[in-house]
């Protein structure tokens, strides 16, 4: 066999072997890429993202787009070739798998957690938006979940409204643990509750619940330090003065909270906040209107600009990372609260953008 032919054959065999190794060799990495964006003022799959009834709403223009990131699943095993391609692809980022799934969660567990965070972000967005507009929102302490096999199983249920513990009124979730830990393991703890079904019926009828029940639970013992426990997680449930429905499928996590809240504010405000401009953004939000950081900020700015956004509302804690690589034509606007974001929208809508707080590189 001529030397040249033999060399080419050997090289081809080596290349083939390397390609096979790249396909079958699994590496502990995951990939992130820009995901779709959705206008919270518009529709998704033929339905309004925000549907408000029982209160006057106003026409809106422009865009207030929430942004997303596509990630490989928790159970997905990336091979070496995919990792190399991700490293060289322009809009993708390959990161250690544990960065996205630090607790070793499965796909099912991760999906469930994202769904719960998404639901909570919607609740907080409604609260923050109405508070921003000066519309009262009432709150109550509820049983958020019951630990399986705990003293409360079968006695308390998710959705029960906790009115008092041992006769002491409960006004915040933390009150429950404080009152329970005054006991010793083995002692009875008396809960005064409104059963979940009665609370739901009263809310549907737009009235205060009238049925209460007293439930005695024998305190258990915490495995770490031996303090008294009853095996529930307390949370906050809000009663809104009129229905606000948020519908958006195939999205999880808490990072759309800010944009949902701003969409609600815009629909309930006579002034057209966007002035027809294309604004996108991201950020968690809590009941007080504080905006928190999110993951995948650079993927979200890329996705926003690809969709046509001119301005991007950026959580203050993400500013440095976002400013490190800003897509051409996109202006980053730094926000720490819903009030910051609302004032920024008003400036953008009026074309008065000279004083907008901007993100700077660290």
Image: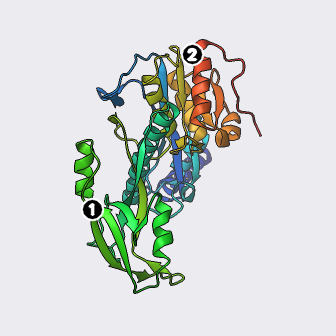
For this rendering, which residue is in front, 54 or 26?
A: 54
Q: Is residue 109 left or right of residue 353?
A: left
Secondary structure of the residue carrying tag 1 is loop
| Residue located beneath label 2 in the image | 349
Q: Residue furthest right?
A: 362
Q: In the figure, 222 relative to 79: above or below?
A: below
- Residue 5's spot in the image, x, y percent? 56, 45
Residue lying at 50% horizontally and 54% vertically, measured from the top left: 79
Q: In the figure, 64 relative to 131: above or below?
A: above
| Residue located beneath label 1 in the image | 212
- Residue 33's spot in the image, x, y percent? 52, 39
- Residue 87's spot in the image, x, y percent? 60, 44
Residue lying at 32% horizontally and 63% vertically, measured from the top left: 193
Q: Is residue 329 left or right of residue 144?
A: right
Crowd tier of the residue under label 2, counting other residues whose Cα lies within 10 Å: few below 14, some 14–19, many 20 or above:
many
For this rendering, which residue is in front, 90 or 205?
A: 205
Q: In the figure, 109 relative to 58: above or below?
A: below
Observer-side mark, 2 or 1, equals: 1
- Marks 2 and 1, the one that precedes in the sequence: 1
Q: Is residue 148 visible?
A: yes
Image quadrant assignment for residue 339: top right
Q: Is residue 2 visible?
A: no
Label annotation for residue 63: none
- Residue 261's spot in the image, x, y percent? 47, 34
Q: In the figure, 131 relative to 173: above or below?
A: above
Crowd tier of the residue under label 1, counting other residues whose Cα lies within 10 Å: few below 14, some 14–19, many 20 or above:
some
- The number of numbered badges drawn on the structure is 2
Secondary structure of the residue carrying tag 2 is helix
């Amino acid at each position: 066999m001529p030397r040249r032919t033999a060399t080419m054959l050997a090289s081809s065999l080596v290349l083939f072997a390397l390609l096979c190794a790249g396909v079958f060799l699994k590496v502990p990495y995951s990939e992130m890429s820009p995901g779709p964006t959705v206008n919270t003022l518009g529709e998704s799959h033929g339905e309004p993202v925000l549907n408000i009834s029982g209160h006057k709403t106003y026409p809106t223009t422009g865009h207030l787009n929430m942004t997303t990131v596509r990630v490989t699943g928790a159970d997905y095993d990336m091979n070496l070739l995919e990792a190399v391609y991700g490293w060289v692809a322009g809009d993708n980022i390959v990161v250690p798998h544990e960065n996205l799934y630090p607790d070793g969660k499965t796909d099912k567990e991760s999906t469930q957690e994202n769904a719960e965070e998404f639901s909570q972000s919607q609740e907080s967005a409604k609260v923050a938006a109405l508070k921003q507009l000066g519309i009262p929102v009432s709150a109550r302490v509820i049983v958020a979940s019951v630990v399986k096999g705990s003293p409360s199983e079968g006695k308390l249920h998710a959705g029960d409204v906790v009115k008092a513990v041992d006769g002491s009124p409960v006004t915040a979730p933390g009150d429950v643990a404080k009152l329970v830990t005054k006991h010793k393991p083995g002692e009875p703890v008396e809960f005064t509750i409104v059963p979940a079904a009665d609370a739901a019926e009263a809310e549907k009828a737009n009235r205060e619940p009238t049925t209460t029940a007293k439930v005695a639970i024998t305190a258990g013992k915490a495995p770490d330090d031996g303090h008294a426990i009853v095996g529930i997680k307390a949370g906050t449930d809000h009663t809104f003065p009129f229905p606000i429905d948020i519908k958006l499928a195939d999205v999880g996590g808490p990072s759309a909270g800010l944009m949902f809240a701003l969409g609600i504010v815009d629909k309930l405000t006579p002034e057209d906040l966007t002035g027809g401009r294309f604004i996108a953004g991201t950020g968690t939000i809590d009941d007080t209107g504080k905006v928190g950081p999110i993951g995948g900020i650079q993927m979200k700015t890329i996705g926003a600009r690809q969709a046509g956004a001119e301005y991007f509302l950026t959580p203050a804690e993400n500013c440095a990372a976002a400013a490190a690589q800003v897509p051409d034509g996109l202006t980053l606007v730094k926000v720490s609260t819903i009030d910051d974001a609302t004032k920024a929208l008003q400036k953008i809508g009026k074309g008065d953008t000279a004083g907008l707080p901007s993100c700077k590189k660290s």
